[in-house]
Amino acid sequence: MNEVLKLCPFCGEKPMIISLPDNHLHSFAVGCQNEKCNARVSGATMEDAIDVWNERVTDEATN
Ligand SMILES: [Zn+2]
């Protein structure tokens, strides 16, 4: 299965998947690679985090 991450809605950079081993509720995060951009979402699983990220991108794009 190949999850596709949409580009950051704020700066257009590619996001990256971050593992959060110390956080039991949100073990994975998707964050923007741009150091000046603080866009980041998290989820219980990698797929969750990706889904939240992609939904957020869609939400921002339609506003
Ligand atoms: Zn960004």
Image (cartoon, helix red, strand yellow):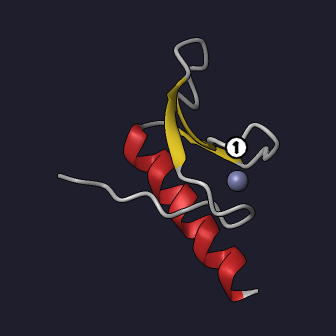
Taking the image as shown, residue 44 lies to the left or right of residue 34, namely left
Q: Residue furthest top?
A: 22
Q: Nearer the viewer, residue 20 or 32?
A: 32
Q: Is residue 56 left or right of residue 35?
A: left
Residue 17: where, in percent of width, then height? 48, 37
User: In the picture provided, is 50 more to the left or to the right than 12?
Assistant: left
Kindly tell me whether mark 1's CB lies below 8 Å from ligand 1.
yes
x, y percentage for residue 59?
66, 77
- What x and y, as percent, mark residue 27? 51, 27
Number of callouts in the render?
1
Please name the residue shown 67% across and 81% down the image.
61
Q: What amino acid type is highlighted by mark number 1?
A: Asn
Q: Is residue 46 above or below residue 11?
A: above
Q: Residue furthest left?
A: 1
Q: Is residue 20 above or below residue 2?
A: above
1 with respect to 38 (left or right): left
Q: Secondary structure at mark 1?
A: loop
Given residues 6 and 51, the one toward you in this image is 6
Label 1 CA crowd tier, 10 Å (few <14, some 14–19, many 20+)? some
- The residue to which callout 1 is attached is 34
Relative vertical location of residue 29 with respect to residue 37 in this rendering, above or below? above
Residue positioned most to the bottom:
62
Residue 33: x %, y % from top left: 62, 41
Q: Is residue 13 above or below residue 31?
A: below
What residue is drawn where x is 71% and y is 75%?
60
Quadrant location, the C terminus: bottom right
